[in-house]
Image: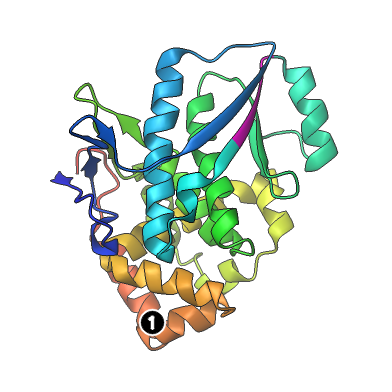
Amino acid sequence: MSTLNLNPNPLNVFCLIFIIAFILGGQPLWAQNFDVNTIHCSMSDDNRATMNKIGKFEGHFYNVIFNTSMNDTVTVKINLYGRKSEYKQVQNENIHTTFIDGFYSGENKQIYLYKTENYMNILLHETSHAILYRNLNNAPKWLNEGIATLFGRMVISNKDEVFYVKQTHYIKLLKGRISDRTFSLEDFFNYKNEDWFNAEKREYLYTVAYCLIYFLAEDNIDNLQRLMILLKEGNSSYAAINKIYGSQSKFEGRFFDFYSKQSAYSSD
C-alpha cells in the first residue's frame, strides 16, 4: 500500500493499491461540482460525502492526464431514480436497453441511474464518463469503460482516505482466457460500440477493458497518459499503442507477461 502524492505528476496518479488524502490544512485542493436531482428517493449525507470526495479525485486525475484545470469547474448532473419503472422509461428513450442500472448521456451531458443497493459504484463509474467526455468526447469504448470500471470501485476508509484495490475477478477471467488461448487483442479492438450493450458479450468486454487500463497504469503510468493524449490527437488505439510500445507484438508480450505474474486472489 502506498500514498499518492497530490502534486499533479502523472507518475503518481495510479498505484497497485493507492491512498489519497484530499484535504490538507482543512482546505480542498480542487473543486468538483455535483447537481443531484432525486426522483422519488433520497441520497444520504454519507453518500453525498463519498461522491464529493471521490469525484474530486476523478476530476483531478483527468486534469493531470490532459494538463488542464478545466475539470475543476465541470458540473456533473445526476438524476437518481427511486422507482425502477421511471428509470426504465428514461433508459429506453436514451439507450434502448433495459439490463443496466445507470448510464451517462453525452447528448444530454447527464447521468441517469436507478437507486439499487450498489448505486454508488455505478454513480462513480458514470462520473468518470461524464468528466472524460469533456476532455475526450470520442474516447474508444474500451478506454472509457476501463477507466470508469476502475474508478467505480474506489472507497473511503475509516481514516477518511480514498483507496482502490485491484479487481481480481476480472484478472481471473482474463488469465483463464489467456490460458485456454481464447483471448485476442486484435479481436477485442474490432468489437463495435453496440457489442458493449450485448448481455452475452458484456462481461468479457469489461474484463479486457479493465485489465488493459490496470496493465497500463501498473506497467508505466506515463504510457497511459501518452496513450490518452495520442487518442485525443486522433490516433487509433492500435496506432497509439504501436507508437508507445514499438509494435503490437511488443505490447502483447508485456501484457501477457504482466498477467502471467498476477494473482487472481484478493489476498495478493
Up the image or down, 199 lies above or below 174; here it is above
Residue hosting label 1: 244
- The answer to whether 92 appears left or right of 24 in the picture is right
The range drawn in magenta is: 77-82
Q: Is residue 179 visible?
A: no
Residue at x 45%, y 59% (from the top left corner): 177
| Mark 1 residue type | Ile
User: In which quadrant of the rendered view does residue 97 lie?
Assistant: top right
Up the image or down, 1 lies above or below 158; here it is below
Task: Give the image location of residue 251, x and y in percent.
Answer: 38, 78
- The answer to whether 142 appears left or right of 212 in the picture is right
Magenta run includes residue 212: no
Residue at x 57%, y 63% (from the top left corner): 136
- The answer to whether 103 appears left or right of 60 in the picture is right
- Observer-nearest of 253 and 104: 104
Up the image or down, 39 lies above or below 255; here it is above
Residue at x 85%, y 37% (from the top left corner): 93
- Image quarter (top left, top right, bottom left or bottom right) of the N terminus: top left
Magenta run includes residue 81: yes
- The answer to whether 194 appears left or right of 52 in the picture is right
Task: Give the image location of residue 171, x and y in percent.
Answer: 37, 51
Task: Give the image location of residue 218, x and y in percent.
Answer: 27, 61
Q: How is the image coloured?
A: rainbow
Task: Give the image location of residue 8, x and y in percent.
Answer: 28, 58
User: In which quadrant of the rendered view does residue 111 lie?
Assistant: top right
Q: Is residue 205 visible?
A: yes
Instruction: Specify the farthest residue to the left.
Output: 2
User: In which quadrant of the rendered view does residue 40 lie?
Assistant: top right
Secondary structure mostly seen in the magenta stretch? strand
Instruction: Specify the farthest residue to the bottom.
Output: 246
- Image quarter (top left, top right, bottom left or bottom right) of the C terminus: top left
